[in-house]
Amino acid sequence: STIYRKDKYTAIENKMISLKVDGGQDYYFSWVALKDKNTGEIYIHGNLHLDYRGDTYRAKQAELVNAELANVIQKYPNAIIAVTGDYNCKWSSSVMTKLVVLLPSTGDDGFCKRLTESQSTSPSLTAAEA
C-alpha cells in the first residue's frame, strides 16, 4: 500500500510486479499514479527492492522495472516520476545506469525539488492498496 495526502491527491492507478529472477527470492516493484486535485498534474511514485546477491540478478530485475516503467511513461507521458527503494547497489553501478535510462532528465536539481516545495505542514494521509 502507499501512503499519500488524500486532501491533495487522488490515486488513479497502482500496480505491483514481481522481480523474481533465476529462482531467487521474490522481490517487488510497486507504483502508484496520483493526480493533484488542484492542478490535474500526475505524479508517479514507484518503490522497489532489488536482489542483494549481485549485479547479475539486479540487472535482470532492472530490465523488468524498465519494461513496467516504459508502459507507465507511455500511459502518463507528462507525469513526474520518482522511484525509491532498496537498490542494493551504488549509484555508479551498471544497474543504476540501466534503471535511469528511461526516466526523463530534469537537470541538476532533479525532480524532487518541485515535490518538496509543495509540501504542507498538516498533511492528511490515506493508503492506496496495491
Image: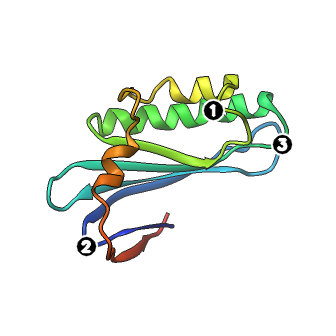
Q: Is residue 35 above or below residue 69?
A: below
Q: Nearer the viewer, residue 8 or 129?
A: 8
Does label 3 or label 1 sit earlier along the sequence?
A: 3
Residue that mark 3 sits on: 23
Q: Is residue 100 left or right of residue 78?
A: right
Give residue 48's position: percent from left, percent from top: 60, 48
Q: Amino acid at mark 2?
A: Asp
Q: Secondary structure at mark 2?
A: loop
Q: Which mark is residue 7?
A: 2
Is the residue under label 2 in contact with that under label 3 (CB below 8 Å)?
no
In the image, residue 22 above or below residue 45: above
| Residue nearer the viewer, 32 or 7 | 7
Residue marked by disc 1 = 62
Q: Which callout, 3 or 2, points at the residue further toward the start of the chain?
A: 2
Q: Position of residue 11 (x, y in %)?
A: 33, 62
Element at badge 1? helix
Q: Which one is earlier in the sequence, the residue at label 2 or at label 1?
A: 2
Image position of 45 (left or right of 40) = right
